[in-house]
């Protein structure tokens, strides 16, 4: 999506049609984990339903993208009909003018051009602008929009597509009470949401934005090992994926330290410790940690002028 614009923040309809329990597991703005109490969390969510936008305008650049997105939203039935896809000259400004909340989702290098389209400054006045652009700072965005525009950064990830995402949002001023509820309502409908200071955003971009690519590479490598030992490919991928999902959910839902979960499956003299030693020979810990370090450094350069 390019500039995805959410508008008409009023009571009533919203496009959310399903919720997974993982979303019920963080209940305050810091995202602190608490024991799951579905009944009370449900009540909180229902009370917050009124914060959800009920009308959505989504702009893209190419007509092929518009058609493809239309098909995607049509699959949602009535909920999908609330989303209008706009494409062509001037649609970004029209969409922003008709909206209360603006989600900026284009490539970092496009942001300045989009925010400087004729009429955009007036359209953005007093709006909440949520940018998912990697590496583009709030200070930079503030310099491109009117003073009255409220600017927030968010870093979601691809599992948002199945409502299992992780979104980090930049810390808000304490008096942005409505904005905070609105942001939580939007991003909790597609997974977990946590607020963190903007200074952590490059690390969040690496760990949470890029993290799914790193994790799925490990998953693929585990499946390759299974295939090497004779497992059919599809089953090897399923076994690796469910094993990774299962242990990740145990970390989130029990709060037990990952090392303790590793120890709990490691029988003395058994095959797990044999495999773990081979893994350590490959320096997997420093390789993974350095991966995040390198991606963080790279994220800080995105959206910045080349020196
Ligand atoms: N991919 C990820 O997992 C994550 C990405 N991000 C950030 O999201 C942003 C987008 O990345 P990604 O989704 O990978 O990129 P894509 O290329 O998939 O999406 C970019 C979108 O911007 C649209 N676009 C381009 N120019 C315009 C314009 N002038 N007006 C309106 N729309 C326009 C494109 O439309 P069209 O298709 O018609 O060209 C396309 O839909 C980046 O800033 C990235 O840093 C953040 C978190 C995670
Ligand atoms: O690789 C990128 O630039 C984007 C940012 C986070 C995930 N993908």
Image (spheres, grey):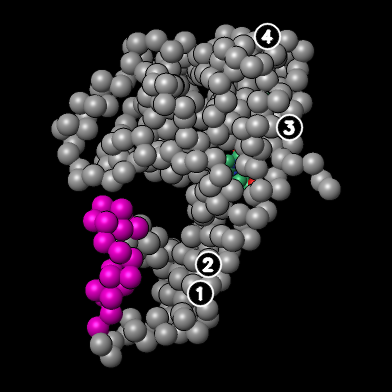
- Which quadrant of the structure image shows residue 181? top left
Tell me which label, 4 or 2, sits earlier in the chain: 4
| CB of mark 3 near ligand 1 (< 8 Å) | yes
In the rendering, at what x and y percent does residue 304 appear? Answer: 74, 42
Q: Quadrant of residue 180?
A: top left
Above or below for 191 versus 172: below
Query: Where does residue 257 sit, x and y in percent of width and height?
Result: 30, 64
Nearer to us of marks 4 and 2 is 4
Q: Can residue 260 be found in the magenta stretch?
A: yes
The disc, 1 or 4, on the residue closer to the chain's N-terminal end is: 4
- Report if the CB atoms under discs 2 and 1 are less than 8 Å apart: yes
Residues at marks 3 and 2, CA–CA distance in whole angstroms: 31 Å
Label pair 4/2, CB-CB below 8 angstroms = no
Name the residue that disc number 4 marks.
122
Q: Residue 288, which numbered label?
A: 2
In the image, taking residue 88 as reference, residue 221 lies left or right, namely: left
Please say if 95 is above or below 156: above
Determine the residue positioned at 56% across, 15% down: 127
Location of mark 1 (residue): 284
Label 2: element kind: helix
Residue located farthest toward the front when viewing the structure as drawn: 174
Asked if the residue at label 4 sits under 8 Å from ligand 1, the reply is no
In 3D space, how far apart are the residues under numbered discs 4 and 2 (Cα atoms)? 46 Å
Callout 4: SS: helix
The range drawn in magenta is: 248-267
Q: CA distance from mark 1 to mark 4?
A: 51 Å
């Amino acid at each position: 999506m390019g500039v995805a614009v959410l508008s008409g923040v009023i009571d009533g309809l919203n496009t959310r049609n399903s919720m997974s329990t993982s979303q019920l597991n963080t209940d305050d703005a810091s995202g602190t984990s608490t024991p799951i109490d579905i009944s009370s969390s449900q009540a909180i969510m229902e009370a917050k339903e009124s914060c959800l936008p009920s009308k959505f305008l989504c702009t893209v650049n190419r007509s092929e993208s518009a058609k493809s997105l239309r098909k995607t939203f049509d699959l949602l039935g009535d909920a999908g009909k609330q989303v209008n896809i706009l494409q062509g000259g001037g649609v970004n400004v029209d969409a922003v003018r008709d909206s209360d909340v603006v989600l900026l989702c284009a490539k970092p290098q496009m942001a300045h051009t989009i925010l400087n389209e004729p009429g955009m400054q007036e359209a953005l006045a007093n709006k909440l602008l949520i940018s998912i652009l990697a590496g583009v700072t709030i200070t930079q965005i503030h310099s491109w929009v009117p003073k009255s525009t409220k600017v927030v950064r968010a870093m979601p990830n691809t599992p948002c597509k199945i409502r299992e995402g992780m979104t980090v949002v930049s810390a808000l001023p304490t008096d942005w009470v409505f904005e905070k509820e609105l942001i939580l309502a939007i991003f909790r409908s597609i997974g977990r949401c946590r607020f963190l200071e903007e200074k952590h955003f490059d690390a969040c971009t690496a760990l949470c934005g890029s993290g799914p690519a790193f994790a799925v590479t490990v998953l693929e490598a585990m499946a390759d090992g299974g295939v090497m030992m004779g497992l059919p490919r599809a089953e090897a991928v399923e076994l690796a994926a469910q094993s990774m999902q299962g242990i990740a959910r145990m970390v989130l839902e029990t709060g037990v330290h990952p090392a303790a979960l590793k120890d709990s499956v490691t029988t003395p003299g058994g095959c797990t410790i044999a495999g773990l030693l081979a893994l350590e020979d490959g320096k997997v810990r420093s390789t993974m940690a350095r991966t995040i370090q390198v991606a963080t450094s790279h994220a800080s350069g995105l959206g910045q002028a080349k020196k």
